[in-house]
């Protein structure tokens, strides 16, 4: 792909070995995608969802995947600013799961909350999920980034997941 301009018009940094930059034109954002992964886009009302996945295993075992959701109009829907809504979602997750780590910071115009937990659903192998809520109180929107991988493969899978999560280029005007 020759497209290599970041949101501000500057050149994107070179993609690490095994990754390519994926343009998410619908939300004017970019994400690093492992080269062999596939991308699926869905629209539900005003919300946009992009799923990056390693595909389907021959045994139907869960494969690592990354999803990025963009939800506009949070104040009208949730009756609170996106930053408070994100904190409420994280608090609710903490009531239902044993959170293994949780951080909060302000970065690039977003109030960001990240947390990770392990989940074992009936009939499925144990999975680790890492969520990142990126709230934009100025625009009233919320980005929800989620990386999931089988617990037995987490350490290896997170090597790719970390690159994806830490390289997001989100439009602060969204």
Image (tube, rainbow, N blue to C red):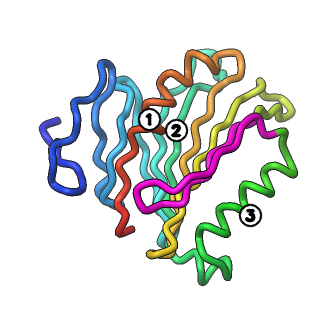
Q: Are marks 1 and 2 in contact (CB under 8 Å)?
A: yes
Main SS type for the magenta part?
strand
Q: Nearer the viewer, mark 3 or mark 1?
A: 3
Q: On the rendered image, what quadrant is the C terminus found in?
A: bottom left
Q: On the rendered image, what quadrant is the N terminus found in?
A: top left
Of the pair 13 and 127, the residue shown nearer to us: 13
The picture places residue 75, in percent across and down from the top left corner, at: 59, 80
Q: Is residue 40 left or right of residue 97?
A: left
Q: Nearer the viewer, mark 1 or mark 2?
A: 1
> What is the crowding at mark 3: few (fewer than 14 residues within 10 Å), some, or many (at least 20)?
few
Q: Mark 1 or mark 2: which comes first in sequence? A: 2
Q: Which residue is mark 3?
A: 88
The picture places residue 171, in percent across and down from the top left corner, at: 34, 60
Q: Which residue is mark 2?
A: 66
The residue at 49%/67% (across/down) is 136
Q: Mark 3 or mark 1: which comes first in sequence? A: 3
Tally the marks: 3
Q: Are marks 3 and 2 in contact (CB under 8 Å)?
A: no
Q: Mark 3 or mark 2: which comes first in sequence? A: 2
Q: Which residue is mark 1?
A: 164
Give the magenta part as a residue range: 99-117
107 is within the stretch colored magenta: yes
Classify 126 as above or below 28: above
Classify 104 as above or below 70: above
The picture places residue 158, in percent across and down from the top left corner, at: 56, 24
């Amino acid at each position: 792909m020759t497209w290599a301009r970041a949101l501000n018009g500057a050149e994107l940094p070179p993609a690490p070995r095994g990754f390519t930059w994926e343009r998410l034109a619908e939300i004017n954002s970019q994400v690093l995608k492992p080269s062999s992964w596939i991308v699926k886009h869905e629209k539900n009302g005003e919300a946009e969802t992009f799923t990056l996945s390693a595909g389907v295993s021959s045994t139907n075992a869960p494969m690592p995947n990354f999803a990025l959701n963009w939800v506009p109009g949070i104040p009208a829907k949730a009756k609170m600013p996106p930053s408070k809504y994100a904190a409420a979602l994280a608090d609710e997750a903490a009531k239902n799961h044993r959170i293994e780590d949780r951080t909060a910071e302000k970065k690039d115009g977003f109030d960001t909350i990240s947390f990770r937990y392990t989940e074992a659903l009936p009939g499925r192998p144990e999975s680790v999920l890492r969520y990142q809520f990126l709230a934009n109180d100025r625009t009233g929107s919320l980005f929800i980034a989620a990386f999931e991988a089988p617990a037995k493969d987490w350490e290896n899978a997170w090597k790719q997941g970390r690159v994806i999560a830490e390289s997001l280029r989100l439009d602060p005007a969204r």
